[in-house]
Image (cartoon, rainbow, N blue to C red):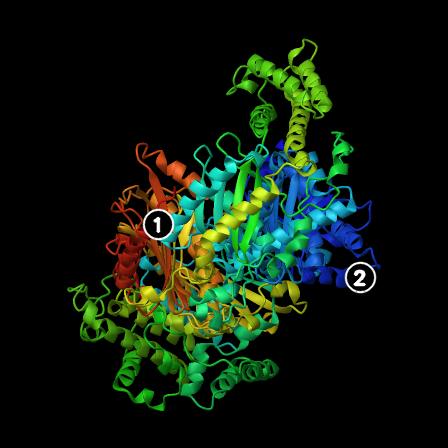
C-alpha cells in the first residue's frame, strides 16, 4: 500500500503515484465510484480531497509556527513522510511495512532528483514547475505522469533488488582488459567519428558509456567535458532501465548459461529484438516538454504544432546534468540498445547550451538577493557577496537584448526587468528592501521561463538530434566490437564477482560490500535471489534471507553514519555485521579519523543518488588535508556469529586491502 | 513566524489534551476543545493554533489509515500522540529523545491521570477543568521534572542510590512490606524514601503512579491533599492518608495474585490457604467474602504464572528456584534450623543493639558474627570478602526464608508486630554479614519482582499478547481501589488496598500496628545514613538498565555533563532505540572520532559502556588492533564491581 504525491501550496495535486492496493483501499473506504471512461479523474479528485487537510495544515504550520511536519506514524504502522521543496510539498505513504520512514524520504528525494534531471532549472520556479508537472491537456498529463510513475517504479525495483542502488554507487564489471579495450574503442573510434561528422547537427558527444543491465562496462568522457557525477550517472541508469528494463528473473536458463561457450547460435544480433518491441510504447512518452502555457504566454503555441507527430526512436531525451559551469546543464541523451540488456549511452552537448550558463548566473544572483532580502538585509548589504550591482545590471541588459533577437519570447522577461529596475534603482522605487521581493521572484520565474524555452520546448519541437544514420552507425560499430563478448557480458553482469572466490581466504564471511565513495563505485558479490541457478548462498529462501539482512545492514549503517558514527559492529542473531568508513590518500595511506558531523533528522538521506552526502563529507575532510587527494571508502561485511571477533576484524582488514587493488583500473 | 517563540522552542516540553467532540460545528471555538495545555502561559491563540492543526491533521491521517496516529514528527520537535474517543493527547519533546521513550512517557502520563481520577470523560464531569489542570501539571512534572536525560531515555523508575545504603535496610523495607501484606485486604505496597523507590512489590508501571502522590505530598508536606483525602492521623512527622485510585483489571489481577512471598509460604505450609484463613479469622472476622474472593482470584486468575524466575539478571544471578518450588526437606537443613534458633535467641534480647549499629564494615561472615559480640567493630573489614561472598548470600537467603517461615509458623503469636520488629532488627544487626555488592538487595528485589518479571517478560516477548500500553485509555472498566499511605518524614509506605479497607478499622489497625515501629526505625536509620559523596566515577561511563524492574544503575551524574557524557548519552539513546526495534540485536559497538560505546543486552537488561580518555589515533579503517574492539572485555571487568555481570 504505497503512495507518493506532489502538491503545491494551494493544495493542488501536481503529480501522484499509487500502487493498486492503495487505490483499491481508498476506493473501498470512500466508495469512490469509477465511472466508465472517467475512472482516473474521479480517483484523482478523491486523492486531492483526502490529502487536502494535510497539505493545508502544512502551509499553516510553516507560515505560523515556522515548523513543518516531517512524518506521521499510526498505530497500525502506516507511515507518512512529508517534505517541502520550495513551493512543492511531497508526501509519501506506506501502509504495508515494506518501506521505512527513511526509504520514503529517499523516495521523495529521488522524485525530486528525477524532476531535476527532466526539467532542469525549471524546477526552481514554483509556477513553472506546476505547469511542467501538471500539463493542462489531459492526454499530455497522462503521458507525463505515466512516464514519471514508471520511473518511480523502476527506481523502487532497482533499490529493492540491485546492490548498486542499495548503496547508491555504480558497479563496474570487473574485467580490466575488456574494460580498457572498450574505453579505447569509445575514445578513438566512436566519439571521434561522431564528433567529426557533419551530420551531428551541432551536437558534440561529451560522454559515452556502455551498460550491461545496471553495471558499467566502460565509460569515456571527452577531454573538455565536466565530470559526470555519480548522482547523475545513477539517475541516468534509472532512465535507461526504464527504457530497456532488464527482467529481474531473466529466463536465461542454466542450460543456456552453460552453453555460452558456443553462443552465436542463440544470440545472433537481431535487428529488432523482441525486447525493443515491447518497450516501444514507452518511447511514445518522452515528450514531456510539450505543453501549452497560456498564463505565462511564452508563445510556444507555434511550436506545439510541430511536436504532435509520434517521436521516432532516434530522438534523444533531454536531460539536465551537473557541469562545472552550471548545475543543470542541458544534454541530449541517446540510448542505443545493442542487445537486450546491453546499452550504449551517448550524452551530447547541444547547441546554445552555453545560454544555460548565463541564465543560471543571473538566476543565482536573484536567488541570493531574495534570500538576503528575506532575511531582512536592505540596501547594499542585500547585495553583498555579489559583483557590483551596476555591472550585473548592464550584463543582464545586454543578455536580454541578445535573447530577444533569438526567436524566443522575451516580452515577459523584459517587462519583469523593467518593473524590477523601476523598483530597485529609481528614486521613486522601494530600493533594495523587502518590498522588492515580489519583483525579485518574478524575475526568477521569467528567467526560468527563458531557460525553458531554450532547452525544453525547443528540444521537442525542433528536430535537433544526431542524424539517425549516425546513430545507426555508432550502434553497429559497438555491436561489432562486442559481438564476441556479448554472452560473456550478460553472464558476467549476473556474477560479477562471487563469494566462492573469497570463501577459502575468509572462512565464515557471508557477504560484503566495498564502496569507493570518491569515484562513486562499488563492488559486491552477486546476490542472485531469483535466479534459477544455485548460488553460493543456496537458492530461494536462504539467499533471500541474506539479502534482507544486507539491506537492513545498509540502512542501519546509514542511520549511525547520519549521527556521526563511522564504525559500527553488531551482533544480531546468528550473524555479525561490521561497517567501516575511512579516508585514505591517493597512495592508500590511511588518514586519521575525523569528526564526522552529526546531521539533524530532517537532512537529506545519506547516499549519492539524490544528494551527494559523501561529496560533502570529502570536502569537509579535505579542508584538513589541503595538499593531498583524499579518498573515502566504506566496507560492510556479514559474518557468521560463531566466528571469534578477532578473526572477523582480521578479515575485514584483509578484505579492505585485497579489494583496494581492483578498483585501480584506470578510468580515462 | 515570530509569534510562536514559545512553541518553537524545541527544548520545552508541550502537552495538551483536546476533545474534538466539543468542536464540531462551524462556529465552535477551538479553545472549547482544549481541556489542558502545557505550558500554561502559552497565549490562547497559539494553543488554538497548535491544537487545531495537530488535531485536524491527526484526524485526517487516522481516517486515511483507519488507525489512530501514534507519532507526529516536525522538523524541530516531535509529538507522541494518543487518540481515543474524541480525545487527543499530544506530548512533545526534543528530537533527540528516542521515539519509544516519548511514547512511553505519554502513556505513563495518561495512565497516571486515570489512576488517580478514573476515566477521563467521567473525571471532567466530576471536577472542574482548573482542578484537573493542576493535576495534569503535577503528573507532568513528576514524569519529566528533575530527571536526567538518561532517565528520560529509559523512562525508568527513580530508585534510591543503593551504594550508600546499608543493604539490610533494603531488606528491612522489604520485610515491612511483607508484614503489611499479611492483612488480606492489602494487595501490594512499596516504600519510598525522599521521592525514590526503596522497595516495591508492584510492577514498575504501578510504582510510578504511586510515587506521584508521594512527590506531591512530599512537597506539600502536611497540607490536605486534593485527591479525595479521607482521613489523616498523626503528627507532622507521621501522617496517614488514603486515596481513591483506579486500577485497570490487568493491574488488579497482577497484584491480587499471590506475591512471591505468600506463594513461598504456602509451599512451605500445605495446604496453601490455611495460614491466611487463620489470620483472617483472627483479625478480620467480618470480611469472609473478601477473603474467598481474593483466594479464588488467586486460583482463577493467575494460573499461567509460574514461579520460575527470570533468566539470570546480574542481581538475581543466584538461582531463586529453590524458593519457588516446594522443597519439604528445606526446613531440616542445618543452616535453617540454626537460623530459627538464632532468631529465637535474638528474640529474647532487647532492642538496644539497634542504635549501636550504624553502617559499619559489612564484610564479616555470619559465622564469625555469631561467635562474637553483636556490637563489636569488625577488625578485618575486607577479610574473606570474595571467598565468603557466596556463602553469605546463601545464608542471607536462608535467613530471609527462615524469617518468612517464622512468620507463618508463629502467626498465632499475639505479639506479632514486635516479633517482626525485633527480627528485622536482628537482621539489621547482622549487617556485618553482608557484602556491599548488592547481592542481598538484588535477592530481595528479584524475589519480590520476579513474578511481575515473568509476566512482563512474557508480555515483552510476545508482542501479540502484550498489554496495550494505553490500556487505561482503552479500558472503560477501571476498578476502584484504595491507596493507603503512611508517611514518616521522608519515608513513605504506600499500599494498594481493597476498597473495603476504608470501612474496616481493624484492618487499618493491623497494618498500622505491623508497620509503625519498623517504619520509624527505618526512617531513623536512613536519616542518619550519611549522603556519602560518590567516589571518583572511574575512567569510564556506564549505564545498566534493568528492563524488568525498570530501573537504572549508572555513574553518570545528573547535573554535570561533560563532553564524554554527552557522547555517551547520544550513543545510548541511539542504541536503546535500536535495541527496542530489533529483538535479535545482542550487542553493538559504535564509534565516532571522539568516543566508542559498547552496548549489550539480554532479555532482561541493557548495558552501555564507554571508556573515557582520549582514544588512540586511528583511521577508522578495519583494524584488529583497534582499541574500540576491546571494549566488551573492559566492560566485563569494570562493571563487575557495580554488580553488573556481563556474559
On the question of residue A282 being in view, the answer is yes
The answer to which quarter of the image holds residue B439 is bottom left
In the image, what residue occupies the spot 48% across and 32% down? A324
The residue at which mark 2 appears reads as A31
User: Which residue sits furthest right?
Assistant: A36
1 vs 2, front mark: 1
Q: Residue B560: x percent and y percent? A: 37, 43
Q: Looking at the image, which is closer to me, B260 or B320?
A: B320
Label 1 and label 2: CA atoms lie apart by: 57 Å
Q: Which residue position holds label 1?
A: A663
Q: Please state the horizontal and vertical placement of residue B523, each as a whole percent of the image.
A: 39, 60
Q: Chain of mark 2?
A: A
Q: Identify whether A159 is placed above or below B172.
A: above
Relative to A123, residue B221 above or below: below
Q: Quadrant of the N terminus of chain B?
A: top right
Mark 1, other Cα within 10 Å: few <14 / some 14–19 / many ≥20: some
Residue with the most extreme top position: A427
Indicate left or right for A528 with B524 as reference: right
User: Dot 2: few (<14), some (14–19), or many (≥20) neighbours within 10 Å?
Assistant: few
Q: Secondary structure at mark 2?
A: loop
Name the residue located 36 percent from the left edge and 78 percent from the top edge: B320
| Chain at tag 1 | A
Q: Is residue A47 left or right of residue B393?
A: right
Residue at coordinates 70% horizontally, 26% vertically from top-left?
A408
Amino acid at each position: 500500500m504505497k503512495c507518493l504525491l506532489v502538491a503545491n501550496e494551494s493544495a493542488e495535486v501536481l503529480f501522484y503515484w499509487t500502487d493498486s492496493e492503495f487505490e483499491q483501499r481508498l476506493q473501498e473506504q470512500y466508495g469512490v465510484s469509477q465511472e466508465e471512461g472517467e475512472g482516473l479523474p474521479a480517483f484523482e479528485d478523491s486523492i486531492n480531497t483526502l490529502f487536502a487537510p494535510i497539505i493545508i495544515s502544512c502551509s499553516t504550520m510553516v507560515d505560523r509556527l515556522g515548523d513543518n511536519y516531517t512524518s506521521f506514524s499510526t498505530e497500525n504502522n502506516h507511515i507518512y513522510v512529508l517534505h517541502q521543496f520550495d513551493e512543492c510539498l511531497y508526501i509519501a505513504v506506506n501502509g504495508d511495512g515494506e518501506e521505512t520512514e527513511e526509504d520514503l524520504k529517499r523516495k521523495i528525494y529521488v522524485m525530486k532528483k528525477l524532476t531535476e534531471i527532466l526539467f532542469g532549472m525549471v524546477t526552481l520556479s514554483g509556477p513553472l514547475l506546476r505547469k511542467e508537472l501538471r500539463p493542462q491537456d489531459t492526454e499530455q498529463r497522462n503521458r507525463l505522469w505515466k512516464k514519471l510513475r514508471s520511473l518511480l517504479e523502476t527506481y523502487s525495483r532497482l533499490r529493492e533488488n540491485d546492490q548498486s542502488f542499495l548503496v547508491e554507487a555504480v558497479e563496474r564489471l570487473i574485467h580490466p582488459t575488456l574494460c580498457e579495450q572498450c574505453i579505447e574503442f569509445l575514445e578513438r573510434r566512436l566519439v571521434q567519428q561522431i564528433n567529426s561528422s557533419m551530420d551531428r547537427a551541432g551536437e558534440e558527444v561529451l560522454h559515452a558509456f556502455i551498460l550491461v543491465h545496471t553495471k558499467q562496462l566502460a565509460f569515456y568522457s571527452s577531454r573538455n567535458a565536466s565530470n559526470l557525477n555519480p548522482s547523475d550517472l545513477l539517475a541516468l541508469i534509472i532512465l535507461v532501465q526504464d527504457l530497456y528494463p532488464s527482467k529481474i528473473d531473466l529466463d536465461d536458463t542454466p542450460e543456456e548459461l552453460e552453453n555460452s561457450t558456443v553462443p552465436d547460435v542463440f544470440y545472433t544480433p537481431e535487428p529488432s529484438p523482441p525486447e525493443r518491441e515491447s518497450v516501444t510504447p514507452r518511447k511514445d512518452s518522452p515528450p514531456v516538454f510539450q505543453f501549452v502555457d497560456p498564463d505565462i504566454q511564452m508563445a510556444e503555441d507555434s511550436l506545439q504544432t510541430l511536436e504532435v507527430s509520434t517521436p521516432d526512436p532516434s530522438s534523444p531525451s533531454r536531460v539536465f546534468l551537473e557541469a562545472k559551469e552550471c548545475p543543470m546543464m542541458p544534454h541530449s541523451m541517446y540510448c542505443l540498445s545493442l542487445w537486450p540488456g546491453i546499452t550504449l549511452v551517448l550524452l551530447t552537448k547541444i547547441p546554445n547550451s552555453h545560454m544555460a550558463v548565463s541564465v543560471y548566473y543571473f538566476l543565482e544572483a536573484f536567488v541570493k538577493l531574495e534570500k538576503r532580502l528575506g532575511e531582512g538585509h536592505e540596501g547594499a548589504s542585500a547585495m553583498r557577496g555579489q559583483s557590483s550591482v551596476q555591472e550585473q545590471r548592464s550584463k543582464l541588459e545586454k543578455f536580454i537584448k541578445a535573447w530577444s533577437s533569438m526567436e524566443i519570447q522575451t516580452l515577459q522577461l523584459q517587462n519583469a526587468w523593467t518593473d524590477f529596475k523601476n523598483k530597485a534603482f529609481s528614486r521613486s522605487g522601494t530600493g533594495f528592501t523587502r518590498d522588492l521581493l515580489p519583483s525579485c521572484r518574478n524575475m526568477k520565474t521569467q528567467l526560468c521561463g527563458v531557460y525553458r524555452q531554450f532547452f525544453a520546448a525547443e528540444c521537442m519541437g525542433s528536430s535537433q538530434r544526431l542524424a539517425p544514420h549516425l546513430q545507426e552507425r555508432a550502434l553497429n560499430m559497438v555491436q561489432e566490437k562486442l559481438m564476441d563478448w556479448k554472452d560473456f557480458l550478460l553472464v558476467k553482469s549476473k556474477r560479477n564477482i562471487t563469494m566462492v572466490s573469497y570463501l577459502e581466504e575468509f572462512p565464515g564471511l557471508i557477504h560484503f560490500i566495498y564502496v569507493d565513495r570518491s569515484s562513486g563505485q562499488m563492488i559486491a558479490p552477486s546476490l542472485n535471489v531469483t535466479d534459477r541457478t544455485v548460488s553460493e548462498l543456496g537458492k530461494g529462501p536462504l539467499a533471500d534471507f541474506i539479502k534482507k539482512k544486507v539491506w537492513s545492514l545498509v540502512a542501519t549503517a546509514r542511520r549511525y553514519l547520519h549521527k556521526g558514527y563511522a564504525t559500527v559492529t553488531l551482533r544480531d542473531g546468528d550473524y555479525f555485521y561490521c561497517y567501516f568508513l575511512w579516508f585514505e590518500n591517493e597512495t592508500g595511506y590511511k588518514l586519521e579519523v575525523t569528526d564526522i558531523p552529526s546531521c539533524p533528522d530532517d537532512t537529506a538521506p545519506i547516499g549519492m543518488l539524490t544528494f551527494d552526502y559523501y561529496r560533502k563529507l570529502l570536502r569537509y575532510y579535505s579542508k584538513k588535508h589541503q595538499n593531498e587527494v583524499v579518498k573515502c571508502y566504506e566496507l560492510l561485511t556479514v559474518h557468521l556469529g560463531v566466528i571469534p571477533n578477532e578473526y572477523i576484524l582480521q578479515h575485514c582488514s584483509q578484505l579492505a586491502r585485497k579489494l583496494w587493488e581492483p578498483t585501480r583500473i584506470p578510468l580515462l | 513566524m515570530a509569534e510562536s517563540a514559545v512553541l518553537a522552542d524545541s527544548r520545552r516540553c508541550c502537552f495538551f489534551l483536546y476533545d474534538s467532540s466539543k468542536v464540531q460545528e462551524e462556529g465552535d471555538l477551538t479553545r472549547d476543545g482544549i481541556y489542558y495545555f502545557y505550558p500554561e502561559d502559552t497565549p490562547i491563540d497559539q494553543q488554538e493554533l497548535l491544537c487545531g492543526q495537530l488535531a485536524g491533521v491527526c484526524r485526517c491521517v487516522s481516517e486515511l489509515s483507519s488507525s489512530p496516529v501514534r507519532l507526529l514528527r516536525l522538523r524541530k520537535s516531535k509529538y507522541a500522540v494518543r487518540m481515543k474517543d474524541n480525545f487527543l493527547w499530544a506530548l512533545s519533546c526534543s528530537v533527540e529523545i528516542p521515539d519509544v521513550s516519548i511514547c512511553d512517557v505519554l502513556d505513563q502520563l495518561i495512565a497516571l491521570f486515570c489512576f488517580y481520577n478514573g476515566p477521563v470523560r467521567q473525571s471532567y464531569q466530576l471536577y472542574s477543568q482548573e482542578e484537573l489542570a493542576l493535576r495534569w501539571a503535577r503528573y507532568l512534572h513528576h514524569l519529566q521534572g528533575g530527571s536526567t536525560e538518561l532517565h528520560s531515555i529509559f523512562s525508568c523508575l527513580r530508585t534510591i542510590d543503593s551504594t550508600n545504603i546499608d543493604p539490610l535496610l533494603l531488606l528491612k523495607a522489604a520485610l515491612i512490606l511483607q508484614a503489611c501484606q499479611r492483612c488480606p485486604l492489602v494487595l501490594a505496597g512499596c516504600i519510598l524514601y525522599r521521592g525514590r523507590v526503596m522497595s516495591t512489590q508492584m510492577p514498575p508501571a504501578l510504582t510510578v503512579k504511586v510515587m506521584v502522590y508521594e512527590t506531591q505530598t512530599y512537597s506539600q508536606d502536611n497540607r490536605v491533599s486534593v485527591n479525595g483525602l479521607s482521613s489523616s492521623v498523626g503528627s507532622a512527622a507521621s501522617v496517614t492518608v488514603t486515596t481513591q485510585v483506579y486500577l485497570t483489571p490487568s493491574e488488579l489481577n497482577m497484584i491480587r495474585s499471590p506475591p512471591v512471598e505468600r506463594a513461598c509460604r504456602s509451599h512451605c505450609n500445605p495446604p496453601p490457604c490455611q495460614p491466611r484463613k487463620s489470620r483472617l479469622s483472627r483479625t478480620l472476622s467480618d470480611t469472609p467474602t473478601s477473603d474467598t474472593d481474593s483466594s479464588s482470584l488467586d486460583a482463577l486468575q493467575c494460573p499461567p504464572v509460574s514461579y520460575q524466575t527470570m533468566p539470570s539478571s546480574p542481581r538475581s544471578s543466584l538461582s531463586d528456584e529453590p524458593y519457588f518450588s516446594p522443597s519439604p526437606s528445606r526446613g531440616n537443613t542445618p543452616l535453617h534450623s540454626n537460623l530459627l534458633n538464632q532468631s529465637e535467641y535474638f528474640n529474647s534480647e532487647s532492642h538496644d543493639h539497634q542504635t549501636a549499629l550504624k553502617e559499619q564494615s559489612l564484610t564479616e561472615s555470619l559465622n564469625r558474627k555469631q561467635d562474637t559480640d553483636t556490637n563489636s567493630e569488625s577488625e578485618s573489614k575486607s577479610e574473606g570478602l570474595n571467598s565468603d561472598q557466596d556463602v553469605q548470600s546463601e545464608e542471607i537467603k536462608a535467613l530471609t526464608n527462615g524469617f518468612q517461615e517464622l512468620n507463618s509458623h508463629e502467626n498465632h503469636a499475639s505479639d506479632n508486630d514486635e516479633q517482626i520488629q525485633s527480627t528485622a532488627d536482628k537482621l539489621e544487626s547482622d549487617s556485618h554479614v553482608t557484602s556491599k555488592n548488592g547481592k542481598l538487595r538484588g535477592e530481595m528485589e528479584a524475589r519480590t519482582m520476579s513474578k511481575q518479571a515473568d509476566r512482563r517478560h512474557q508480555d515483552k516477548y510476545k508482542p501479540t499478547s502484550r498489554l496495550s500500553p494505553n490500556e487505561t485509555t482503552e479500558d472503560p472498566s477501571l476498578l476502584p481501589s484504595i491507596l493507603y499511605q503512611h508517611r514518616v518524614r521522608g519515608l513513605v509506605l504506600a499500599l494498594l488496598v481493597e476498597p473495603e479497607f476504608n470501612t474496616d478499622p481493624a484492618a487499618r489497625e493491623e497494618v498500622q500496628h505491623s508497620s509503625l515501629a519498623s517504619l520509624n526505625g527505618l526512617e531513623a536509620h536512613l536519616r542518619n545514613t550519611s549522603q556519602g559523596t560518590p567516589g571518583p566515577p572511574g575512567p569510564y561511563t556506564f549505564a545498566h538498565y534493568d528492563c524488568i524492574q525498570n530501573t537504572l544503575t549508572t555513574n553518570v551524574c545528573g547535573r554535570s555533563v561533560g563532553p564524554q557524557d554527552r557522547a555517551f548519552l547520544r550513543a545510548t539513546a541511539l542504541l536503546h532505540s535500536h535495541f527496542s526495534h530489533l529483538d535479535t540485536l545482542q550487542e553493538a559497538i559504535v564509534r565516532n572520532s571522539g568516543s566508542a560505546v559498547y552496548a549489550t543486552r539480554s532479555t532482561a537488561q541493557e548495558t552501555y559502556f564507554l571508556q573515557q580518555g582520549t582514544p588512540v589515533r586511528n583511521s577508522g579503517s578495519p583494524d584488529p588492533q583497534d582499541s574500540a574492539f576491546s571494549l566488551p572485555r573492559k566492560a566485563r571487568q569494570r562493571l563487575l564491581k557495580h554488580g553488573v555481570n556481563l556474559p
